[in-house]
Image (cartoon, rainbow, N blue to C red):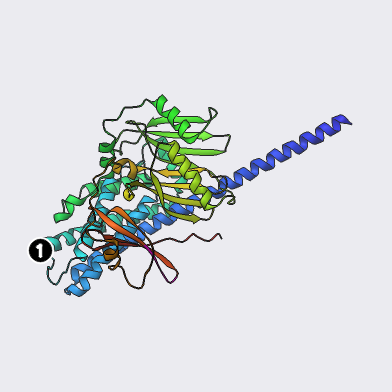
Amino acid sequence: MYKNILIGALAVAVAGAGYWGYQQKEEKDQFAIQAENSYQRAFHDLSFHIDQIEDELGKTLAMNSQRQLTPSLADVWRVTSLAEKSLAELPVQGLNMEDTEEYLFKIADFTYRTSVRDLNQEPLTDHEYETLEQLYEQASSIRHTMRETQAMMMQTDTKWLTEREREEESEPAEYSVAGHFERMNKSVQGFSEVEWGATDSAIRNLNGELKEALSGRERVSKEEAKAMALNYLKLGEGAKVQISDSAEALEYPAYSIVIDDPENQAHYNMDMSVEGGEPIWFLQDRHIEKAQISLNEAVEKAQDFLERGGKEHMMLVDSTQYDNLGVLEFAYVDNDVRIYPDTVTLEVALDDGDIVSYVGRGHLINHEENRDIPKPELSKEEAQSRVNDRVEIMEDHLAMIENQMQETVLVYEFYGTKNNDTYRIFINAQSGEEEKVERMQDSEPMY
């Protein structure tokens, strides 16, 4: 009898374990499907935006009216910004895409600066028309490569997740997705130098800025980086850690760290700087269950995390809930002035309060103790008088931001509402110019 009971109990245990394993596989497969769909959407969006860039640039060359040219150039800037966003969403971090990223940035910056100019008073120069012609030809070359890649993926039913795993193990094959992207980047390298005018001085090299910001700090070994990563994520010795030198595409020396945490059924990826041992970004890969904590509780978890990492005087400046995830942005505060270039972004899982994503690049590049902050020339009331009368002001702050010309300026930051929308409006505290207007995101509904 006892033997039968024991056999029955073992059978139930085996069945339970099998069901649990099946459920875990189902959840992992579902996560993979969602990630693959996200990559496919970003890729096809990128292809579409590259087509639009070529079309819009072609239109500008045929226009003779300054009234039509300004909105057309603005459209090139808008679509190029969308292309940059789509490229950033693709898993191509291990590839050298800096030339393509810089090229898109230069198009966006050139067309923005040209479109905000009064073209009736200051028409396009012959050099600027030549620039537009070169950009049109080069956009055509990029579009051709994108179309080849798109056709190859559709014909071979290539998956981004499978492709990423393959490229992590070996060099990109010529006719793989990575191979196509590297060919596109090389074709951009081969473009003749474009006469960008004043735009050249404004080109940002974030990797170079990060290298300069980290330079001179004490170097850490791989073993030290491993211990620091485990301590930073509060993981025990049971976690398995793989650490290697980062991709050659990065200008700054860093370790790429992969951690498997079987206790919590989670997987981490992290880049940590060799100089200073600073986490630059990390991402936790796991299925997030139904929300159990509020967004306010998530903020407390994020604040504890930042304090544990030595990030002091950081203030929450933006928070949004996307389904079971809280996305939080913190800015450094210096003498009651919010320093917006000095920010970190975190994502908090609302099932258990885990920090599942962290990006600290802005803080590492722009953090500065005892920053020289100018005194405002305008009073708060004078600055507020420059805000649209239809916006009802709810709160205000002094802040430092980077404007569209990439200059760091002191501003009054006004939060206001109009109808059902909330806006953040930045008025220059010295000149009274409206530097920037942002519409704040509402929390996404759960579907």
Element marked by disc 1: helix
Which secondary structure type mostly characterizes the magenta part of the structure? strand
Q: Is residue 67 left or right of residue 355?
A: left
Q: List x then y, in percent, for residue 157.
A: 46, 51
Q: Is residue 433 left or right of residue 83?
A: left
Residue at 12%, 68% (x, y): give it: 122
Q: Nearer the viewer, residue 416 or 395?
A: 395
Q: Is residue 55 visible?
A: no
Q: Read off the magenta span.
A: 415-419
Q: Residues within 10 Å of mark 1 (few under 14, many from 20)?
A: few
Q: List x then y, in percent, for residue 222.
A: 39, 26
Residue that badge 1 annotates = 126
Q: List x then y, in percent, for residue 79.
A: 31, 62
Residue type at mark 1?
Answer: Asp
Q: Nearer the viewer, residue 370 or 329?
A: 370
Residue sticking out furthest to the right:
1
Q: Is residue 260 above or below residue 295?
A: above
Q: Is residue 410 inside the magenta stretch?
A: no
